[in-house]
Amino acid sequence: MEVFNRKHEDCNHELEPIRGSITILTVKLLVLLVVFDGLYTFIFYVLNLGIPLPFDLQHHIHISEALFGLQLINIIFQVVLLLNIILAWATDMYFLTEKHIIRRSGILHISEETYHYENIRSIAIKQSWLGKLFHYGDIFLKISASGGYQEDILLAGVENPQKYQAILKKLF
């Protein structure tokens, strides 16, 4: 589907989802894995030091069984949180059409919001130094319409935000 601005000039842009940056997704996943594995390694180390546990627990639990149970809990938490992070990234997206910005989110309960280009009042980009280094940033859209309706839309962690800023400026 090609996108046209209000003057019907061809922008030669195909409908594609605008999602968060792969870099941010990867960093979130790596941090999650490092934190959980680091925590497990610390507990493993403490239990194997032979330090007396509070309430004389070392006589009541078997260290290997406790570590096995702890590893199972670790794996379950990691899988649940990994799925949460990945599905949140994959299911929250924006689409640019001929006259609208469409935000679609959800898996089982799909929510869709439509914003008209003529209601966009301003576009701003915010990038940190890491965002500039890895080519991601946030796009802020100010929307207002008759009747005092106002809304701020945040497209967070978008890869190559300047590209989408240029496309949006052509469209409104």
Image: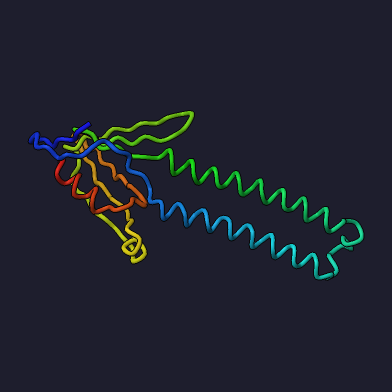
In the depicted structure, whether residue 12 falls above or below residue 75: above
Dividing the picture into quadrants, the one containing residue 45 is: bottom right
Residue occupying the point 66% across, 45% down: 76
Percent coordinates x, y for residue 40 in the rendering:
69, 59
In the depicted structure, whether residue 26 falls above or below residue 54: above
Residue at the far right in the pictured view: 59
Q: Which quarter of the rendering shows the N terminus?
A: top left
Q: Could you tell whether 171 is left or right of 64 in the image?
A: left
* Residue closer to the observer: 122 or 76: 76
In the depicted structure, whether residue 66 falls above or below residue 114: below
Percent coordinates x, y for residue 66 in the rendering:
80, 54
Dividing the picture into quadrants, the one containing residue 136 is: bottom left
Q: Could you tell whether 101 is left or right of 63 in the image?
A: left
Residue at the far top in the pictured view: 109
Q: Which quarter of the rendering shows the C terminus?
A: top left
Residue occupying the point 23% across, 54% down: 162
Residue occupying the point 59% across, 60% down: 35
Percent coordinates x, y for residue 44 in the rendering:
75, 63
Dividing the picture into quadrants, the one containing residue 99 is: top left
* Residue closer to the observer: 133 or 60: 133
The total number of labels drawn is 0
Q: Could you tell whether 156 is left or right of 124 in the image?
A: right
Residue occupying the point 47% across, 32% down: 107
Q: How is the image coloured?
A: rainbow
